[in-house]
Structure formats: structure tokens, C-alpha cells
Amino acid sequence: MASEKHPGGPPPGSRAQRIQAGLTGVLGEARGALAEDFPSGAQHLLCDLLAVLAAGLGSLDLALARLAARIRTTGALAGSGHTTVAGLLREHGRSAAQANAITTVADHLDDYPRAVAAAEEGRIGFAQLALTMDLSEKAVAGRCTELYPDAADYRSKAEDIMVQAAEKGVTDRTLKRIGSQLPQRIDPREHEDRHRQAYDTRGADYTTDAFGFTLQAWGDTASEEIIRTAVDAHTAPPGDGRTIKQRRFDALVQLCENRLLAEGLPVPVAEEGSDAAAALAAPRPDTEAEGKRRRGLSRPQVNLVVPLDSLLLAEGAGPATTDRGRLLPPSAARAFTSDCVLRRVVTDPVKGLVDIGRARRTFPAPLLQALGATAGTCQWEEGCSVPARWCQGDHRTEWWEGGTTSAANAQLLCGRHNREKHMRRLEAHYRARRHHARTGKHQTGKESGRDDEDGSLGKAA
């Protein structure tokens, strides 16, 4: 221990001895406050003392980080009995997490000047500084090097987002979530590109043999949310001896059966005692009274939290998040909000939830019925045969861009073409943005695929 190596403590008159004396004085003042009798109405001085000590801890940690950086550059660890600064810090009472935070900051003091300045000025805490550096470095390491060959430029963008959030006083948990979303916040185009690749390579493989079949499916995150939500809504709770995989299989069979019933088509009668018969006879969460024809469940809901800035494609806006924690790109979020139950949620970074507005449907039932009466199928401009009753209401000019929920601004699109429309519009938007960044000129509607001249998103349906 330090006391064994230096029995007399720091050399008299040294900087270490003066710092030790100063810390002893600070601790003595703090202990004196515990025994002091404050006059009535002056107890707030205890809170002031707590605030000063807490702020001082952050400053001390930052000083430790600067000292750790100097120790590394000078090779001062040689002969100390320690191989790492973190080990030295742990020996003297710091936890592994605290030691790692200090060494993280020590490693990147020169890489994050704005974050360090914010910590020095007390606008963010030391823990937030360490989180900013750690999560930003992870984003830098995982970036697309083709789009962002310059690591310093990408790091600067990540730093801006993290410091701005930390200065608002968000919790460490929220800051960690923002840090995990940095790739999507820095460049939603990459998120869109990967989402589009997953969508373009979507598929299902169906193989059979003499005794059964195998069904495999793959695709994009938005489609996954739809499938999982529908299957979960039809999955009976445990307790009847079936495994979760068997219950999901039976739910998939029920979904298909519901579609046949809704279309007025006969449901194939499976051979008694067969696996198919067992699946069709499995407990259903929507079983009605005897003698009534089942028409399937009400439409299951995909729950989505979408920042308004994300719909408006603001720089640094957070991506949409499902209730399963999956991130969706702007095009998928826009597609889901075309015809939905909409609820305004107002939050504050410090206070949390502030207000929840009343829910409303973006397309009322009478308007959807009127659209269905005039359009027999999906109104996709390239043609689609999906019946109107399986389509969604869609704003030609989106409601967040000022479009009204009216018959003149409405059309019916099937789910696939609704998502396709928004993917195409986002592609046109990012193409126009890249053109402007490269040339300084705005593309015309003809060049960018838009039918407007004011920079709004282009036409796709």
C-alpha cells in the first residue's frame, strides 16, 4: 500500500503534500458542518455544502484524468509496482467502473474539446463526459467507413449530439440510449439504406416432405414488427402443455384461418387426429360464444414512439422506437403513422413525462368507408390488386407537412406499397440533399423525382 511504500507520506513541501493538506482541510470543514447548529431558516446551507462537494468531486475526477494522461505519456508507472493507471486507482479506493471512466477520459482528452470544456465549466458532469467519450468511440469504430472515411468528422458529430443531450440534464440511462442511437442520429440515410437492403432481400422459403413442411421468412424490421404483433395477438397464454414455439405455430395457422373466414372461403378440414387438426382445435384467445361465426381479431397494434423531429427529418433527431426496443428508420415510421391511432406525448429531459394528449385516429371510419366505395383496390400508381378492405388510409400530402385528413388528400394503399412509397420519398430526399451538399444548388422537381419546388419530399404515389 502507499503507506508502506512511503511511511512518512508525501515529501514535505511537495505538491502532493500541499494537495493532501488541502483535502484534509476540506474534509475538516465538511465534518464541522455536521456538528454545527444552524440558526432557524439557515439549514439550506447544508444543501449548499452538498452541492459544492458534489461539484468538486467532478473536478477532482477530471484532474485525475489529466494526471493519468500525463502518467502514461511520461512512463511514470515504471517502478511503481503497477502496470495500468486503472490498477493504481483501484488500489486507492476507486471502483472498477470509476477507474475505467477516468482512464477513458484520459485517453480522449484531446479528441473531445467541447465535451471537456462543458465539464470544466460545470455544464455536464464527469460521468456524462465519460459516457460521451465511451459511446461516441463505439459509434466511431462501427461507422460506415465508405460514407465517413474521416473518423474525426464522425467523432465531432457524435460529440455534438451527446453534449447537447447531456447539457439538457438527461439521466445517464437516457444518455446511454442516445449513445446507442448515434449511427441513426448522425446519418439516418445509412439506416434507410440498410433497411431498404433488408426489404429488397425479403423472402419466404416453403419446403415440404412426405411428413410435413418448413417455412422460413426474413426481411426488414418494420415487417418483423407487423408479423410479431399479429402472431403475439393470436398466441394463447401458456398453461396448456404447448411450448412457446408450438403456440406461435398455432397462432400462425389461426391467422391464415381468419383470413379464409374473412374472405368467405372454406377452411380445409384436416384429418382427425392429425397435427393440422390439433392446431386448428387449439385454444384461441378470440373464441366467441357457441354458434357465432368468428371473423378474426381486431387489428393488432404496432406501438411506436416517434419524435416529431424524426418525422420532419431534423438533423440529429432520434429514430422511432417500437415497444420491443427495435429502431425503425424515418420511412418506416412515416408509413406506420399514415393511418394510426395517434397520441401526443410531451416529455421534458429532466421532469420526464409532462403531458399525454387524447388519442385520435388519423382517418375516421366514414372517410375510410367512402374511399373503399370509390376505390376497389390499392391505389398504388403502378397498379395493385389488393382489395380496398385490406388497405390503409394514406395522406397524399403528409399531415406533418400540412396535409389535411380529407377525401381530397386521401388514398388507399396496401401495407407493402405504403412502406414502399415512403422509402422512395426518403431516397429522393437524401439524393436531393447530397446534390445540394455537392453543388450548392437545389435539384428541380424533374431531377429529383419531386413534383414540387419547395424542398418537400417527392412523389411516389
Image: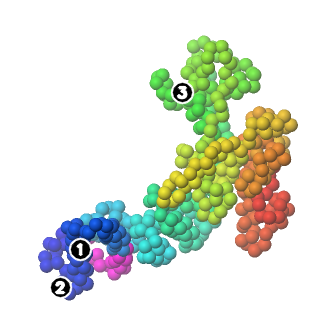
Helix, strand or loop for disc 2: loop
Tell me: 17 left or right of 254: left
- Span shown in magenta: 62-82
Residue 261 position, x and y percent, is 71, 23
Residue wearing tag 1 = 29
For label 1, count other residues whose C-alpha is less than 10 Å away and answer few (under 14), some (14-19) or many (20+): few
Rendered residue at 51%/59% (across/down): 349
At label 2, the amino acid type is Pro
Q: Residue at x 84, y 47 (%)?
A: 408
Q: Which of marks 3 and 1 is nearer the N terminus?
A: 1
Neighbours of disc 3 within 10 Å: few (<14), some (14-19), many (20+): many
Residue 46 image position (x, y, % from top left): 30, 67
- Pick whichever of labels 1 and 2 is earlier in the sequence: 2
Proximity of marks 2 and 3: CB atoms separated by less than 8 Å: no
Of residue 131 and residue 48, the one placed in the foreground of this image is: 48
**Which residue: 25% across, 84% down?**
15
Q: What element carries label 1?
A: helix
Q: What residue type is labelled 3?
A: Ala
Judging by the rendered image, the residue that carries numbered circle 2 is 12
Work out which quarter of the rendered image holds the N terminus and state it.
bottom left
Answer whether residue 114 is magenta in the image: no
Q: Considering the numbered disc 3 on the image, is that residue within a helix, a strand or a loop?
A: loop
